[in-house]
Amino acid sequence: MRVDLFDFDLPEERIALRPASPRDSARLLVVEGEGFGDRTVSDLPALLRAGDALVFNDTKVIPARLNGLRQRGENQARIEATLHMRMSPDSWKAFIKPAKRVAVGDRISFGHEGRICLLGTLVATVAEKGDGGEVLLNFDFSGPVLDEAIATVGHMPLPPYIAGKREEDERDNADYQTIYAREEGAVAAPTAGLHFTPDLLSALDSAGIERHFVTLHVGAGTFLPVKAEDTEQHRMHSEWGVVTPETAAALNAVQARGGRIVSVGTTSLRLLESAARETGRLQGWSGATDIFITPGYRFLTADILMTNFHLPRSTLFMLVSAFSGMERMKNAYAHAINNGYRFYSYGDSSLLFRDDNA
């Protein structure tokens, strides 16, 4: 499909730079059938039914943005690296800026801005260099020691549309993390989950709505624009995830008794679909997924999707268009823009009901 079909105009002032407070006071656009409903996230228990099941992504964002110095003889260059996928105990794939200043074999020292880790300077070697500024970094540290060093010198990897407008601060350490995050490894938050509070989870429990967890370590590739003119030419970056056999069995049981699977976020949905592709039914699964969902895709798992508002021409806007219909989503986004909804990671949310005729 032509990528320009997924374009739309978004006024700059609609991009949220801070989340709503409290989190569940964010607005929620309900997209069901041909109509739209303007609600708040705190209304979620009333919008679902007893016996439905929410699926959360429990990945935890690490401080994956590293500032460093590339040393080549007497020449130095400032480098920013955003880690996006762990490849081994001592190596990560990363996006480098500016990419033209880095070559295979270069050594980069991170933490030069005065945040050197207690173990010494965090140093990596550029082992491979690919397209679009992607490199493979081999660090001098490994395993938990490397994790500790990254946590010491790294910064919270705010999305570029926020980081380009203001500096990261202490508030972001809490704001850009779900309250149920537990499995470290993401370099971008599963943002639909940012709206949940302890009070909202309690209300959902009281309403008889189940909670289940999967893990997909969201990569920085989620923010990369689709530069191809046709979706067939776009290459997705892989992300690592796991659905346990116990979770798969529980969700299959939910649907068998007439309950609905409610995916909290596109990350949870992409992982569920990856776990069901082989047999057409959810099963235990782990590995790297590069699933790319566009209109015409037939969903196997979720009945409802809760998700924030996405960038134009992005793979995520393509996914929601596949889930609820392209024209319906274009109309929903126009409604959201015209009615003051806040967009992207710190913005408002939507509750989308699946349209199998999309």
Image (tube, helix red, strand yellow):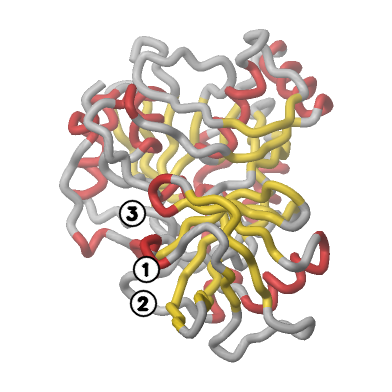
Q: Quadrant of residue 108?
A: bottom right
Q: Amino acid at mark 3?
A: Phe
Q: Nearer the viewer, residue 29 or 129?
A: 129
User: Badge 2, how many Cα within 10 Å: few under 14, some, many 20+?
Assistant: few
Whether the residues at callouts 3 and 2 have beta carbons within 8 Å, the answer is no
Q: Quadrant of the N terminus?
A: top left
Residue underneath mark 2:
166
Disc 3 versus disc 2: nearer the observer: 2
x%, y% of residue 250?
78, 24
Residue with the most extreme bottom position: 114
Residue underneath mark 1:
17
Determine the secondary structure under disc 2: loop
Residue 171: image tag: none
Q: Earlier in the sequence, mark 3 or mark 2?
A: 2
CA gap between label 3 and label 1 equals 9 Å
Residue 343: image tag: 3
Q: Is residue 99 left or right of residue 283?
A: left
Q: Earlier in the sequence, mark 1 or mark 2?
A: 1
Whether the residues at callouts 1 and 2 have beta carbons within 8 Å, the answer is yes
x%, y% of residue 335?
22, 42
Q: Is residue 89 visible?
A: yes
